Image (spheres, rainbow, N blue to C red):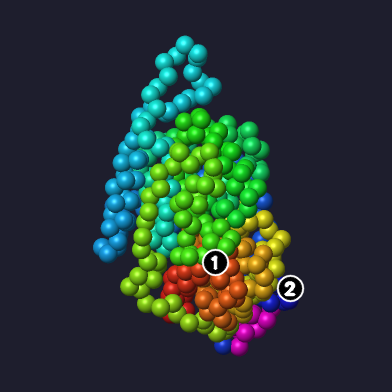
Amino acid sequence: MPCSLTRRLQLRTVSKTSPITEAAPLSLCAREPQVPADRLVAEMVPPPRFDTVRFDTYVPDPNQPSQTEAVKVLSEFASGLGGARAASAGKRRWFAKKPAAPAGPRGIYLDGGYGVGKTHLLASLWHATPAAPEHKAFGTFVELTNLVGALGFQKTVQTLGGHRLLCIDEFELDDPGDTVLVSTLLGKLVDAGVALAATSNTLPGKLGEGRFAAADFLREIQGLSAHFRPLRIDGEDYRHRGLPEAPPPYSDEQVAKAAYATEGASLDGFPQLLEHLARVHPSRYGALTDGLRAVCLTDVEPVPDQSTALRLVVLADRLYDREVPVLASGLPFDRLFSDEMLNGGYRKKYFRAISRLTALARDAKGLVEQ
């Protein structure tokens, strides 16, 4: 069903209960953003949700001492990046004195399950590193590969090679080609003196705890393994630690009414949104959400296939990063993905999406109550 027809049906639904005096909601389906390469570079900073996080705002689980230890280790790592760079390739003359390389690995890999606060800690490391924002970068693996696609490999090396630190969240190892590409890029950056920090995703077939083990990560990045110190972080998903259960889905009428009453809200049918995501490159999903204060979805139903599911995961990440609440009717978010998906190689991504969408549904509860 086209988005415009869905909108007319929703409009009639709201009209049955109350006159509509508010401006019509936005529509994600009507957006097809174009993102220039310079924006991709400028946006390589912690997303809004993690803009104000610091090591002292991380609340370790008292039952998980590895979390407290992680804060200590990362704080020391950040402090160690305040001296001279390990190398300043292309800027030193042959007779210049080479600065001493810092002792120990120039990279840290945060090893833990979803929801233990790895992104919070990674963003805190970025904030704590004593360097100007333009000399340190933060992004997901997908955003990094998109940057290479937009700038080209050599230009990306030149752009990031002058940085003090590169943080990569959710390093994805499910695509061998992308893994080799990024591993090669990181090798060039290490040679240029850039410090690295990363979290990673699960490989197909790696089930276990729903996390990707450090040994597997180091093996996949091959020659870079010596540059990384694994840092294990144990714990449960903090998004649900001590919090009430997410509210059940609302009716179509409630969702549409809230969308019209909330400035900056979008309103779309879930099936139509999934179709639209197939026409927009995932690198533009962040721009797709520009200016949104809430996302309202009707007719949430199971995701039909894995390609669609993976696109939805990226959108969920962008919405979560930007703290955009999600109000929905239809099925609850824990029924989005089939048992086959939740038991397959991408299970960690799907569980993360469920966790994040559930948190955003909890945030949206006030939109109905207002």
Q: Badge 1 is on which residue? A: 347
For image coordinates 54% across by 22% down, the residue present is: 90
Residue that protrudes farthest toward the bottom in the picture: 16
Q: Is residue 244 left or right of residue 252?
A: left
Majority secondary structure in the magenta region: helix
Q: For the image shown, how many numbered marks are present on the structure?
A: 2
* On screen, residue 250 above or below 82: below
Q: Is residue 12 magenta?
A: yes
The quarter of the picture where the N terminus appears is bottom right
- The residue under label 2 is which amino acid type? Pro
Q: Is residue 217 among what the camera can see?
A: yes
* On screen, residue 100 above or below 310: above
Nearer to us of marks 1 and 2 is 1
Quadrant of res 125: top left
The magenta stretch is 8-16
Q: Is residue 269 left or right of residue 262?
A: right
Q: Residues within 10 Å of mark 2 (few under 14, many from 20)?
A: few
- Tag 2 or tag 1, which sits nearer the N-term? 2
Task: Indicate the position of residue 28 as horizontal and vertical percent values.
Answer: 63, 65
Task: Indicate the position of residue 158 as horizontal and vertical percent values.
Answer: 58, 31
For image coordinates 55% across by 71% down, the residue present is: 342
For image coordinates 41% across by 48% down, the residue present is: 230
Give 84 or 222, whichever is nearer the viewer: 222
Q: Is residue 58 magenta?
A: no
Which of the labelled discs sits on residue 2, or is there none? 2
Task: Indicate the position of residue 100 as horizontal and vertical percent values.
Answer: 38, 24
